[in-house]
Amino acid sequence: MAFTLYLVRHGQTYLNKYGRMQGWSDAPLTESGISDAQAAGQRLANVDFQGAYSSDLSRARMTAEFILQQNKQEQHLVKPVELPGFREVFFGSYEGLRGADIAPEIAHAKRMPQADEITGYGELTQHLTMDGTMDAMHELDEFGDAEDAAMFWKRFDAAMDAVRQKHQDGDKVLVVAHGSLIRNVVARYHDEQTTHIAPKNGMISVWQVTDDDMQLQAYNDTTTVW
């Protein structure tokens, strides 16, 4: 079994705009975020989707709805199936804080030699890896609520298995999710180096999905018309 997955990041939200860690918090789309979603929809308008899914957070669901509104092939797909397993990473007590503030704090707490050079979440993940960053945030969260890698992958894998069970060879499937989630998937199935490129709001990644693997075909694409 192999199907094509179009994994899209939601449009810009106000917390994205302000550089804050969003996770399970759920700020609304900005006007720019609505434009991000509509632009992705225009570039996917000719794709004949056999299924559409999203995180159950409103920024992902709304982005998926904007995309489906513009699709010229499958008029019966107007809303995505919402799967909580496709939520963003939960950052626990770090939710809502500025990435530029918490990244150096975590780097110093982990006694990283490069701590003084860490100025943002992206740089932190470059030194700790994507899984390592989740584990560090879970370890350092005073409430212990932030997800570690095992927690994240357990729910993501369950969501992906649910999608796999619904589809067959040759299907084309839309999933709208989140930036760190997409980076995590890239790190696991492709390489860590690619995750150093932060996914843009409304970007499209394309994957070939089999029973036990995912192969990256396009990443952070904001120009291709499929």
Image (cartoon, rainbow, N blue to C red):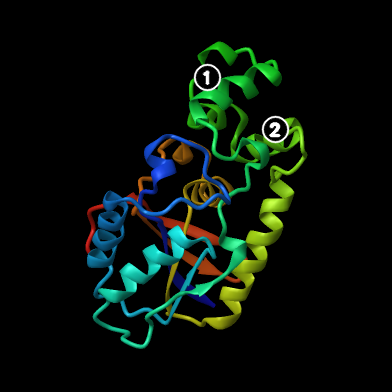
The amino acid sitting under disc 2 is Ala
Residue 214 lies, in percent from the top left, at: 53, 61
Residue 176 visible, this orientation: no
Residue 105 visible, this orientation: yes
Q: Which residue is mark 2?
A: 136
Find residue 51 and report its image quarter.
bottom left
Residue 114 lies, in percent from the top left, at: 58, 14
How packed mark 1 is, by other alpha carbons closer than 10 Å (few <14, some 14-19, many 20 or more), is: many
Which residue lies at the image location 37% right of the left edge and 39% below the top edge?
A: 17
Left or right of 142? Residue 92 is left
Query: In the structure shown, which secondary structural element does the residue marked by tag 1 occupy?
Result: loop
Left or right of 47? Residue 83 is right
Residue 207 lies, in percent from the top left, at: 44, 62
Image quarter in which the C terminus is found: bottom left
Image quarter in which the N terminus is found: bottom right
Q: Which residue is mark 1?
A: 118
**Image mark for residue 87:** none
* Vertical side of 165 occupied by 103: above or below: above
Which residue lies at the image location 32% right of the left edge and 68% below the top edge?
A: 66
Q: For the image shown, how many numbered marks are present on the structure?
A: 2
Find residue 6 and report its image quarter.
bottom left
Which sits earlier in the primary sequence, circle 2 or circle 1? 1
The amino acid sitting under disc 1 is Ile
Which residue lies at the image location 51% right of the left edge and 82% below the top edge?
A: 168
* Vertical side of 124 occupied by 83: above or below: below
Find residue 83 and report its image quarter.
bottom right
Residue 90 lies, in percent from the top left, at: 63, 47
Left or right of 40? Residue 119 is right
Query: In the structure shown, which secondary structural element does the residue marked by tag 2 occupy?
Result: helix
| Gap between marks 2 and 1 measured at Cα | 15 Å
